[in-house]
Image (tube, rainbow, N blue to C red):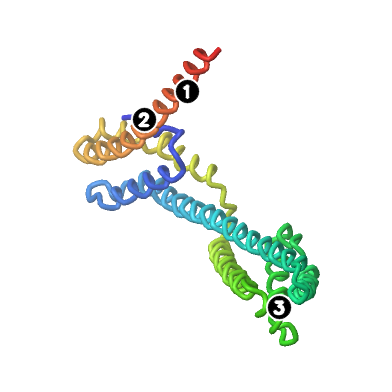
Amino acid sequence: MKKLNKNSRIAEVADIANRMVYLFEKETVIKDDEVLKKVFADISQSSAKLIDAIKSDRILSDLKVADKVRDEAIRRLEKMLKGYSVMPIESIQKTGKKLYGVFAKYGVGITRKSYSEESAYIKALLIDFSMEDIKADVESLTGLKEILTEIDTVQKAFDKKRMDYEKLITGNTYKSQTYTLKMDIVSKINNIIVPYLISSKNTNPDAFTNFANVTDKVISDINALVKSRSKVKNDKSKNENKIEETTT
């Protein structure tokens, strides 16, 4: 019976943990085994934390993307207003300079602020551009109203992503460290479950053989994936070395 490869990906470890817990809970003969009950209860808790951590990482990644989208919209607004402020048509240039002055109170520098500061500045900027005394000016410049609407839309999308992230991490009493959680599960599988099942299968084959074999199959499937990835990586490295040798 093989141990789980430590190079298994975080998502793979979360998956195998859930599968093993599910398979153990379906057992009828050994479901009350004290050693396995304890270790699978621990693995179930660690797996739940790991899944939350994975979700947290994914949502944080989505949040960064949403931030880049609103940054780009702000930069486009600046370029548009700069363009209008140097137009050769006097009336458009005058309006462009006036509205660029409104934008300049905030500037493109707000894209380098913290998430909270940037959100506050963007919302204040949108309020300024919605004031009645410049409403006609905004509508007179082609595309300006549309880009302000776009900024409002992407800011709301950012707010939603940030709320999702904060909801996920609020109330967690642990620090979501995916690698630590992953290795905790791997350690319990390799240092407790596998040795225990090997021993129990020999001393009580009728009770433990089925679960030991199923567990071995689940672990072997993941190990095969890791081995396959490693082979592809090694083959790629060899090919790159051959290409380098032929060009020198």
Point 26% across, 40% down: residue: 214
Residue that appears at 25% across and 49% down = 27
- How far apart in space, not on screen, are marks 1 and 2 (Cα)? 14 Å
Dot 2 crowding, Cα within 10 Å, few <14, some 14–19, many 20+: few
Q: Is residue 144 above or below residue 22?
A: below
Q: Nearer the viewer, mark 1 or mark 2?
A: 1
Q: Quadrant of the C terminus?
A: top right
The kind of residue on which mark 2 rests is: Ser
Q: CA distance from mark 3 to mark 2?
A: 57 Å
Side of 233 relative to 124 (left or right)? left
Going from the N terminus, do you reach mark 3 or mark 2 first? 3
Q: Residues within 10 Å of mark 1 (few under 14, many from 20)?
A: few
Which numbered marker is on residue 228?
Answer: 2
Specify the amino acid type for callout 3: Phe
Q: Please, is residue 152 above or below residue 23 in the view?
A: below
Q: Based on the displayed image, in which of its 4 quarters is residue 72 positioned?
A: bottom right
The residue to which callout 1 is attached is 237
